[in-house]
Image: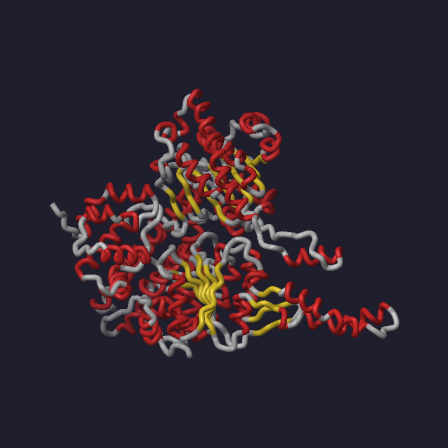
Amino acid sequence: MTHENIVNVKESLEKAGYICSKTVATVVYLAGATQKPVLVEGPAGVGKTELAKAVAKSLGRDLIRLQCYEGLDEAKALYEWEYAKQLLYTQMMKDRIDEVISGSGNLTEAVDRIANEEDAFFSERFIQPRPLLQAISSPEPVVLLIDEVDKSDPEFEAFLLEILSDFQVTIPELGTRKAIKIPFVFLTSNNYRDMSDALKRRCIHLYIDYPDVNLEMQIVKLKVPGIKDRLAEQLINTIHEIRSLDLKKKPCTSETLDWAQSLIALQVNQLTPEIVTDTLNLICKYRSDSDLVTENIETIAKNAGLECSI
Amino acid sequence: MLDLILNFVSCSRASGLRVSSSEVLDCVNQLELIDVLEEPMFKSVLRANFAKSRREQAHFDHIYHLFFHEMRSELSIPHSASLEELMEQALDSLGEELNQDASFQAVLDFMQGNPLAYLEEMRRLQSDMDGDAPSGMVNTFGPLVRRLQIMSQINSIGNAIASFMAANRQTVHWEDRKAMTIHFDERLENARRMLREDPEPYNADQNLITNYEQHMNKLGERSFFSLTKREMEEMRDVVEQLVRKLKDTAQRRFSQHSRGVLDIKKTLRLSAKYQGVPIEVVYKHKPKRKGKIVTLCDVSGSVWTAAKFMLNMLYSLQDCFLQVRSFIFVDELEEVTKIFEKHEINIAVDKALNEAGINYQASTDYGSTFRQFKREYMDILNKKTTLIIIGDGRTNYSNPEENILDEMREKCRRIIWLNPESLVFWNTGDSRMRTYQRYCNELRHCQNLNQLLDFIKTLVL
């Protein structure tokens, strides 16, 4: 199943609990239609990973996720031989091996005979598929999410190229494996470092920024159903005011949602400057940031239209 | 349609975006799938294919706007066909009269709705014509003069058009004349604006870090420049303490890392020696997260104090990195890694100043330093290297050679620029921070100990 057109993408993503802008919908549609990977960039917490999850949900596909980190290698990303199992099998089949080599005239012949059999140990039976191989050999089409690809080593990035352009992997002992069904690939990046041109060339690029007021309002209303309109409005205006300050880490969409949820738990109906300062630790994760917000709380309150409770 | 896209692509290339032909193919294929008449969609397809990092997006938007909006101003006046003809005629006659200079031709093309040459001209201006004069004799006055030339070309075209209008007063209908004047004025104004506006550094993902956690109130906030000798000693002790603390934290993380999983492959291989009994057990040692560091320090008077402390810290933390190589420069580059490796840190700092063959009387020249680096040391940069440059970016009006910095960025993991000057002085006088800013991943203001400490912390942890 694929998306039929851009409007369809938007609707089905909304059904999966993800509200997106038109640009996002366009790119997702094109990636689906042309079977190209998408490279998603943007600040932390704007829903890059969520997007992949939502696409998987809306297409009814499984999501296979590969979290990248420094030191990630092929053995963890692609496949590994199950050495323990191989060892066990050799132990169990010792007698059989004796049988195979019994009657051989000399050592060379014995070795030859074993050589005829030994492929058995490097076969599908003993391979342990890791996310990338799983995604490629799955009979059902899947969504493959390669998360935080910028955290991986440059070597791994180069290794990804084969998968991204041809959807195939090469296992030295077995040969080249082609994808049965081409997966929908998302790569996310936090801009920790620049990706290579070769990688960028193979992907469609998508930058997700902090959502604007309207979009964020829709998101809050969808994810926090109990929230009152007035409170939501105040909340989002305040967040946008805070984002315009020079912070070390700006509050992201997921933090807005956390904040909204906790305000509901606190049974707040009206946002006041005092409540903002009291619950600041939900949105500011550095001390210097919360200090800065506390200093500027009056301007924020004025611009966001909060009432002072005197 | 295809022509339009190809035109746009060559314009993008002319202004410095890197667009490969496979990207063009993809883009054209994708355009077939969407409704091209809907502009936001059209734009996002182009953008998704041509601008593949946040850094390039602002630049892309600028070209897009220029190409599809300013250059294609539709004429909504009656008999526009004849008008167009007239305009062409006007510009052609201009071309015949005054055809003398490449930049003049570029402006003329721009007037006719073909911005390619003009964009290229602009880009050459911004990169200070490095390619044309590799000898390093170019100074920052060059572009200024060039800018003036183009400005006067624009004006002369403006005048020529006005006189053309006056000459043809009889033959052209007044409504046409009016429309033409408006149209031409708009374009001329556009061209002037592009020339006037300084190119915005389109490096949005780079973070300019200006706020800091407070570590120490008194000493930490003093600027490096204003320290007395006694305070300097005091500072040294404080630094030592802090470094020890940092080292502990870093070490803890590394030791956590090495508590690895059983390496079955190696264990099995070793067990073959003992008839398959795994007597020696091997654990997987994860590679430590260590990077290589290359530092370039401007040691001309103004910057050296800050650089000294930075080098001090870096070398005290040496085991947190795979390798640290350092260079100092004024107008030429000198490697001082050996000195720092051999001697105790405080002695080494003094030695580096006295013994390295650096001419301190020369004036700082970033351009020649970069050229020398490219010639001799480019191979030490790889994707694991972090390049740290400490300097105020004051080039004494010589060629800044920022294209070499760009090359360096391509080669290394990231470039961090530390500027010990006060923020207000950036981009004043001969400071080329704005030029260099474009190519750095991170730009830090580093004037006192707190800021330096903050930087070292993010680097190590």
Quarter of the view holding residue A80: bottom right
Closer to us: B349 or B122: B349
Quarter of the view holding residue A268: bottom left
Quarter holding the N terminus of chain B?
bottom left
- Horizontal side of A295 relative to A49 (left or right) equals left
Quarter of the view holding residue A206: bottom left
Closer to us: A270 or B420: A270
Q: Residue at x 74, y 69 (%)?
A: A94
Outermost residue to the left: A310
Q: Is residue B9 above or below residue B291?
A: below
Q: Position of residue B153 (x, y in %)?
A: 36, 52
- Horizontal side of B188 relative to B50 (left or right) equals left
Q: Residue at x 59, y 26 (%)?
A: B355
Outermost residue to the right: A105
Q: Residue at x 38, y 64 (%)?
A: A50
Q: Position of residue B110 (x, y in %)?
A: 37, 60
Residue B131 visible, this orientation: no
Residue A153 visible, this orientation: yes
Closer to us: A277 or B447: A277
